[in-house]
Amino acid sequence: MRNLAAVLLAAVVFAGPAFADSTENIDAGWGFIEPDGGPMWNGSRDVLYDNGPYFNSAGTGFGGADESILQDQTLGMGTYGFGHQHSLSYMVADDFMVPDGETWTVEGITFFGYQTGSSTTSTITGVYFEIRDDLPPGGTVLYGDFVTNQLMATGWANAYRTLESSPGGTTRPIMANDAMVSPSLELSGGQYWICWNTDGSLSSGPWAPPIAILGVGWTGDGLQSLDGGATYNPVYDGGSGDPQGFPFIISGYGGTTDADATSWGAVKALFK
C-alpha cells in the first residue's frame, strides 16, 4: 500500500483493459442468485497484516450479508473486479510492510475472489502465489510459484460485490481463500510484494475485488499482469480512474506491533 509514486514511475501506466477478461466492469450487469448455504469463512486467526477491507457496508446485503459496494453513483466508479485467472496466466499483486526491528513468521495468506454467477458455495479450486522482496517482476522470489496449488480452504466471506445504483445483487458472492505457506517464511523489516492468481470452476473470472471503503476511490497501489508475470502495471478503476488496492490477510506470528496499528486492520474494524 506504500510508495505509490515509486510504483507509478517504475511501471507503465495501464489505462484500460488490453485483453479480454482483464476487468469486469458495470456493463456486465447484475442479478439475483439464491444463496444455498455453502460453507462460510470464519475469519483469519493470528493476523499479522490486513491490507484492506473487502466490504464497505455491514449487514446491508441480501439476507443481512455484508456488501462490497461499487460506488458508481457517488464516485463514478465502474470496475467490479480485476482478472487474475490462473488459466490465462493473469495475475494481480500488492505490497505490505514488515515494521523495522520485527521478524514475522508467515504461515498463511487469505485472498479474496469471486466468480460471477456462483452461489454462496465456493467455486474456487486453486490459489497460486509468490512473495517477492521487490516490485514485480523484479527482485527475488522468497516463496511460492505459479505451478503449485496452495489453496487450503475456501468459503463464502459473507459479502457480495454489488452496485450502488442497483443494490441487493447476489451474483457476485466474495469468497475467502486460505492459502498455506509451508514451510513457514521468516521476513525481517522491509517492503514485500505478493503476486497471485486463482482458479475456479465457472466460466466468469475468477475476479479479484478491490479494497472497498465508502467515500474513498483511491484505495492502494495494486498491480496486474496480463502476460504471465513478464510485466506488471498499476490497476485503475474503469470509471473514476482511481488507483486500486487488493484486500488480503497475512497470518502467522512474531509481530510485536498491533496489526490494527500498522495496517488497514483499524479501518476494517469499523465495518465489522
Image: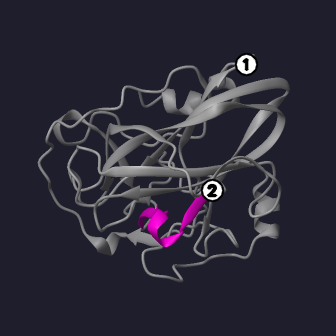
Is residue 91 a member of the stretch shown in magenta? yes
Helix, strand or loop at mark 1: loop
Q: Residue at x 23, y 53 (%)?
A: 167
Boundaries of the magenta span: 79-93
Q: Amino acid at mark 1?
A: Gly
The image shows residue 178 at horizontal and vertical percentages of: 47, 37
Residue position for label 2? 93
User: Which residue lies most toward the top here?
Assistant: 256
Residue shown at 45% from the left, 68% from the top: 87
Viewer-closest of 50 and 87: 87
Q: Position of residue 239 (x, y in %)?
A: 47, 71
How is the structure coloured here?
one colour
- How busy is the neighbourhood of tag 1: few (under 14 within 10 Å), some, or many (20 plus)? some
Depicted 10 relative to depicted 222: above or below: below
Q: Position of residue 269 (x, y in %)?
A: 49, 26
Q: Which mark is residue 254?
A: 1
User: Magenta includes 184?
Assistant: no
The image quadrant of residue 138 is bottom right
Q: Residue furthest right?
A: 101
